[in-house]
Image (spheres, rainbow, N blue to C red):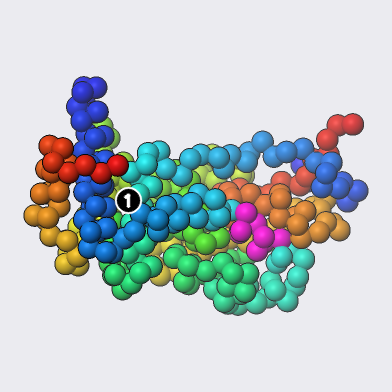
Amino acid sequence: MSIQSIQKYEKSVEIRTKALESLLVEAGLVSTDALEAIIKTYENELGPQRGAKVVAKAWVDPAFKERLLRDGTSTIAELGYTGLQGEHIVVVENTPKVHNVIVCTLCSCYPWPLLGLPPKWYKEAPYRSRIVSDPRGVLKEFGLELDDDVEIRVWDNSSEIRYFVLPERPAGTEGWTEEELAKIVTRDSMIGVTKIEPPVKKPV
Amino acid sequence: MAQQNSKITPDEILPNPKRKEEEPLFNALWEARVFAMAVHLYEKGVYHDWEVFRDRFISEIAVAERLPEEERPTYYENWLSAFEKTLIGEGILTEEQINQRIKELETGKIKIC
């Protein structure tokens, strides 16, 4: 494609979007304020910090964890995390012998209320197909080498259910508070492509 | 590897270099707008079920992935096409309305910011 045709093409998606928006505003179905509010929410409020809070709470509160694994959706709703793509959440727990990882093989379904919108690689074909056909190999590319006796379970979000991984609490965090623990929980560990490494002490 | 040092406190740890979560959610304004429109109409109950949109999105992706890489639409281009088809398929807008409006915008007959 030439630069001119690329520019023209970019313009065409912009114009198509504007056309839809202006027609929907005229029909009274959409307001620009509401769209801006949604964009702001997804950019600022939804994100892995929410999932991290759930994980940290599960690590310090056994009763919460038990409820979370039994009924993810309503237990997560206790924290106010509800909404689109969070209607049916199932929490799967990583243990020394079972490692869980999530994918959406058909598009990009993901637990939005807990993790926000997915990273680019999660939405792309290579991850979506290869995590199913070669999970061990893909995890290795993320830097996660699992022993042969660890069972890998791949959960496909291409149904009504959105899966969420409860990662293992790393060693070296004994006695930490919930807030402190939440800070070390990464997005990728809740997708299941990495583990949370034990904290490393800063050199003095 | 695993460091069993319970004496580490949270303010003493090294930042995790693997934590790369700062990619922008949207690469252009139109991507954010078309994303928000699909969410907004669902939240307002204009289409009763997210599947109404998602099924079309899945079809767009499936078609796109059969194309050679250089011709393949991007994620939000698929989203836009799926959204357009949802609006038409659910009787919310007609194809003629949309094409007419695109023409009006292209020729400057209608201006919106």
Q: For the point 70% across and 74% down, which residue is it?
A: A64
Quick check: B93 above or below B22? below
Q: For the point 56% across and 67% down, which residue is it?
A: A81
Residue A105 percent across, percent down from the top left: 38, 55
Task: Name the residue carrying label 1.
Answer: B34
Quick check: A182 above or below B47? above
Q: For the point 52% across and 62% down, which residue is it?
A: A113
Report the quarter where the C terminus of chain B lies. top left
What range of the chain is rendered magenta? A49-56
Q: Main secondary structure of the magenta part?
A: helix
Residue B38 percent across, percent down from the top left: 33, 58
Residue A162 percent across, percent down from the top left: 47, 65
**Label 1, residues with CA under 10 Å away: few <14, some 14-19, many ≥20:** many
Quarter of the rendering containing residue A108: bottom left
Is A87 displayed left or right of B77 in the figure? right
Is A13 displayed left or right of B25 in the figure? left
* A160 inside magenta stretch: no
- Amino acid carrying mark 1 in the image: Val
Residue B42 visible in the shown view: yes
Q: Nearer the viewer, residue B47 or A28?
A: A28
Is A155 displayed left or right of A105 in the figure? right
Quick check: A27 above or below B79? below
Q: For the point 10% across and 49% down, which residue is it?
A: B100
Report the quarter where the N terminus of chain B lies. top right
* A52 inside magenta stretch: yes
Q: Nearer the viewer, residue A77 or B97?
A: B97
